[in-house]
Each structure stands twice: as C-alpha cells, then as structure tokens.
C-alpha cells in the first residue's frame, strides 16, 4: 500500500490545489494592482521603470484630475441612478412576476413559463427593441437602459425556484388568518426571501453599473451617458488631452487612464465583499426540493 507524502500536515494533493488557487488568485489580483500602482505613480518614476509593481513615490494628481472632469462626474451620477432606481425596479417586477408562477392552482403558469423560456433562446433582436424605445420616446433617456433590462427570463427562473422552496403551509396559514395575496407576499414571502432578493439585487447592480452596449445604442447625448461610456470616450477616443486642457494641469495620460478605471471599479469592489455571502445562500437555497 502506497502512502501519500505529507508536507507539514498537508497531502501532496492539497499542496497542488493550494498552489493552483494561489497562482489563480495572483493572476486575478495582478491587473487590479497594476492599474492602481500606475494611477498613483508620478510620470518621472514611470519613465525610469515602466514595469514596476511597487511605486517609489505616490501622487494623487491623476485622481484629482479625473474627479475634476465634468463628464466623468455626470457619468458617475447617471450610473448611480441606473444602479439604484433600476435595480430596485427590476427586483420589484421580478418578485411580482415570479410569485404568481409558484401557485400550483393558478391556471396558465406553465404556459407563461414556457413563453419566458422561449425568449431565452429566441429574441426579437436589438433593432425591434430600438424601435420600441423610439416609439416610447425613451431614446437619450436613462429609462431606456432601465426598462430594457426588466423581467429577464433567467432571473425569473431563479426567483421562482427560490419562492417555490418556501413552505406552502405558511402562506395557507396567512390566508386562513384573513391575509390577501399582497399581504401574504409582503409580510410572509418577502421577509423569508431576503437572501434571494439580495442576490438578485447585487446581480442587477453589477450589470447596471457595467452597462455599455445598450448605452451606445440608446444614448447619443453626453448628458445621459453612463460611466462606462464615458470611460470608453476618455480612453479610446483620446479625450485625455481635452480633459487635461480643461483643468490646465499636466498629468501623464496613462496615469489618468488608470485612475479613471480605478474610480469605475471601486464602488463594486467595496460593495461586493459585504454581499458575497448572499450569492451562495440565495442561489442554492431554492435548488433542493423536499
């Protein structure tokens, strides 16, 4: 019988797994660290060592320059509006749609679910959707970015699975006590669905914060651009010179690009660790049926 080699209490298999996870973590963290390092590195230090991962001197001029650019501030405000208003509205519509679909005695629920599943494989396309937004006079409006993402089929399936795991005896007891459907939903079902609601809210928030493709299609005015479209304009279209000329300051354009990228990911990085646990609990609690 061959014994496994032990290394300080770990088997060779555990050591390989830990090494793989460590290397993978470094590969994930390295781009963020590189971006952060060069966002605070003076231009003179960058010229001396353009591949250094540890800054010798620190300067916040790039961040001050970026925050002083009006278009970037407008992009932040628009993205925050889309995240807060859009995510709340999307979760509300999601719950109001998924809850009736869990009722076994309600006729037509299977047909409705089939229609939603059908849209996951066959979509009308972006051009018909654009015409719909145009007829609703929502072009160059933030509401076009919000309403076009409401009621996704995948989210409805996840929420329906979770709500189906809630014991029917609880809702039946509320009905016997005289509660109507809305009272049962808001006083019984929603408090028990906090993990799933938090999970879906975070998923919607991340998607809304990173909204880019639909913003290109539905918005042409700079005043309604979300943050990601502003970043694209600043980095790819060469508006760094315009940005620096507006503030009459001289900052290395590469550092300015890195600073704007860091500003765009800081909110998600700060929010995600506190809500990460809801991903596991919210997406798995409805997976097991008893």
Image (spheres, grey):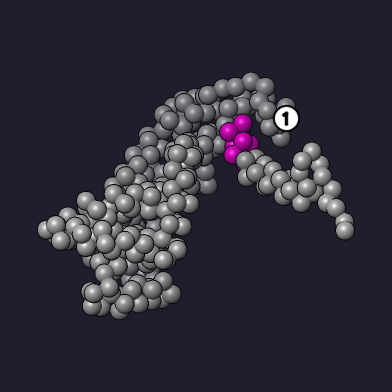
**Along the line of sight, which residue is nearer the eye, 30 or 93?**
93
- Answer left or right for 257 relative to 203: right
> What residue sits 45% from the left and 39% below the top?
274
Q: Main secondary structure of the magenta part?
A: helix
Farthest-out residue, top: 57
Image quarter hosting the N terminus: bottom right
Q: Position of residue 65 (x, y in %)?
A: 47, 28
Q: How many marks?
A: 1
The vertical placement of 169 against 73, above or below, is below
Q: Position of residue 119 (x, y in %)?
A: 38, 73
- Answer left or right for 279 relative to 151: right
- Occupied quadrant, residue 95: bottom left
Q: Position of residue 7 (x, y in %)?
A: 81, 41
Q: Is residue 2 visible?
A: yes
Image quarter hosting the C terminus: bottom left
Q: Is residue 224 visible?
A: no
> What residue sits 26% from the left and 62% below the top?
169
Q: How many other residues sit within 10 Å of disc 1, few (<14), some (14-19) or many (≥20)?
A: few
- Occupied quadrant, residue 29: top right
Under circle 1, the secondary element is loop
Q: Which residue is mark 1?
A: 49
Q: Which residues are magenta?
A: 31-38
Q: Is residue 36 magenta?
A: yes
The vertical placement of 2 against 54, above or below, is below
**Along the line of sight, which residue is nearer the eye, 15 or 83?**
15
- Answer left or right for 145 relative to 176: right
> What residue sits 28% from the left and 63% below the top?
168
> What residue sits 15% from the left and 61% below the top?
176
């Amino acid at each position: 019988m061959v014994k496994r080699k032990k290394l300080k209490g770990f088997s060779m298999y555990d050591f390989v797994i830990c090494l793989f996870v460590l290397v993978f973590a470094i590969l994930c963290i390295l781009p963020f660290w590189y971006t952060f390092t060069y966002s605070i590195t003076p231009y003179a230090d960058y010229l001396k060592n353009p591949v250094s991962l540890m800054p010798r001197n620190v300067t916040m001029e790039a961040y001050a320059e970026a925050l002083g650019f009006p278009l970037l501030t407008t992009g932040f405000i628009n993205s925050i509006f889309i995240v807060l208003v859009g995510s709340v509205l999307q979760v509300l519509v999601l719950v109001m749609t998924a809850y009736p679909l869990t009722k076994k005695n309600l006729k037509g629920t299977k047909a409705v679910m089939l229609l939603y599943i059908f849209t996951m494989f066959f979509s009308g396309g972006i051009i018909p959707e654009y015409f719909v937004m145009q007829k609703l006079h929502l072009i160059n409006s933030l509401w076009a970015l919000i309403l076009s993402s409401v009621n996704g089929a995948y989210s409805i399936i996840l929420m329906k699975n979770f709500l189906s795991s809630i014991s029917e005896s609880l809702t039946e007891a509320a009905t016997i006590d005289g509660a109507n459907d809305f009272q049962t939903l808001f006083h019984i079902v929603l408090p028990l669905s906090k993990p799933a609601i938090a999970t879906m809210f975070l998923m919607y928030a991340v998607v809304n914060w990173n909204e880019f493709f639909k913003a290109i299609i539905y918005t042409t005015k700079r005043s309604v651009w979300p943050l990601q479209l502003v970043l694209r304009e600043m980095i790819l279209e060469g508006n760094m010179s315009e940005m620096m000329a507006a503030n009459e300051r001289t900052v290395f354009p590469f550092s300015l690009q890195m600073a704007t990228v860091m500003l765009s990911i800081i909110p998600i990085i700060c929010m995600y660790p506190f809500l990460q646990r809801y991903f596991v609990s919210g997406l798995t609690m409805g997976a097991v049926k008893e």
